[in-house]
Image (tube, rainbow, N blue to C red):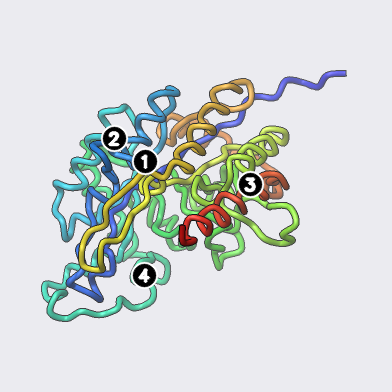
Amino acid sequence: MTGRPVAPIDVCLSVDVEFSPNNALARPERPVLGPEWVYGRAGGRSEGLGFLLDCLDRHGFGGTFFVEVFNTILLGDGPMGGVVADILARGQDVQLHLHPIWRRFLNPRWREEPMLPPAGSDSLVGRQPAEVASLLREGCDILERLSGRRPLAFRCGNLDAGAVLYPAMRSAGLALASNIGVGLMRPADAHLQLYAGTHVIDGIVEVPVTSYRPPLLRGRLLLLTITGSSFGEIAAVLASAARRGIGPVVVLMHPHDFRIALPQGLNVPPRYIADRLRQRRLEKLCRHLAAHPERYRVTTFADAMAGWQDAAAQPRRDDPPPAGSLTGLAARVVENRLLPALRRLPQ
């Protein structure tokens, strides 16, 4: 006997786009890394953002690009504005991302007074609600200036989520959040320890980056990322979520995941080469998603907002996290640990 057809679950390919302060606050002689960190150009090609946009284009997929904007405090609008223009030119979704560490550059004497930023400098958690709301409104204003449109979704830096974020988001006119990633950063607030799906928190729809339970690692959760998960694990998590109707599944990546930075000295910008392993991983994921439209519907935060708001408003059970696979775990150990170790051995 066959069961009822199951509707495809939403899958969101989410990308955090950010520059690197490169520890310049403590070591002012070190160069801040701007667009080159995102593009990762090598041999006349962009192996970072360029590869990522080309890959999505090849498969006809939209992604949501959470763009960090406080870097404009130091670098001005031009560098990230150019990155945003390239993303929008491909028809992709641009939303808001913030790393408050960049605000330390507001000190005009940061070069003369180097210091290791204190704990919490790169988090919105632990601040007063009015300050968080003000920072979010400022971020929205900057992204609107860069992109010509007001963001509707937000992801906090480092997935360092706290209850203070949600009323502040509502005050700033934001509707969707993707702040939570329990497999990376477990929130102190128990009601924020969410693995997947859609959830209403203080009037905001939170869509966590998916966390999953790998086999053999009792009690441990992993974040679903291109960097940390093998293709086998990602495919297993997708299949587990589809069987149980747990969606959306949100995958996290960065443009800099797809190139390797080769150091040329502490005070010299790195040069870049392609990270073929991770590039192949994303290509395989996109082919897999394209081959199974009956199971997976690739979407963006902007396109899915209305449906996610409706789904989040419905009563739901507390789903356990989706599961990885033993073969995927073995592949990750080989790809992420063994192969890099072998490359470091003397030839």
Nearer mark to the viewer, of 2 and 3: 3
Residue at image mark 2: 87
Residue 35, position in %: x, y?
A: 23, 48
Q: Earlier in the sequence, mark 4 or mark 1?
A: 1
- In terms of depth relative to the viewer, which is nearer, 339 or 259? 339
Q: CA distance from mark 4 to mark 3?
A: 44 Å
Q: Which mark is residue 128?
A: 4
Question: For residue 312, what is the image quadrant?
Answer: top right
Q: Which mark is residue 65?
A: 1
Q: Which mark is residue 331?
A: 3
Callout 4 touching callout 1 (CB < 8 Å): no
Callout 2 touching callout 1 (CB < 8 Å): yes
Q: Is residue 158 above or below residue 115?
A: above
Q: Regarding mark 2 in the picture, which secondary structure is present there? A: helix
**Quarter of the figure with the N terminus:** top right
Q: Earlier in the sequence, mark 4 or mark 2?
A: 2
Callout 4 touching callout 3 (CB < 8 Å): no
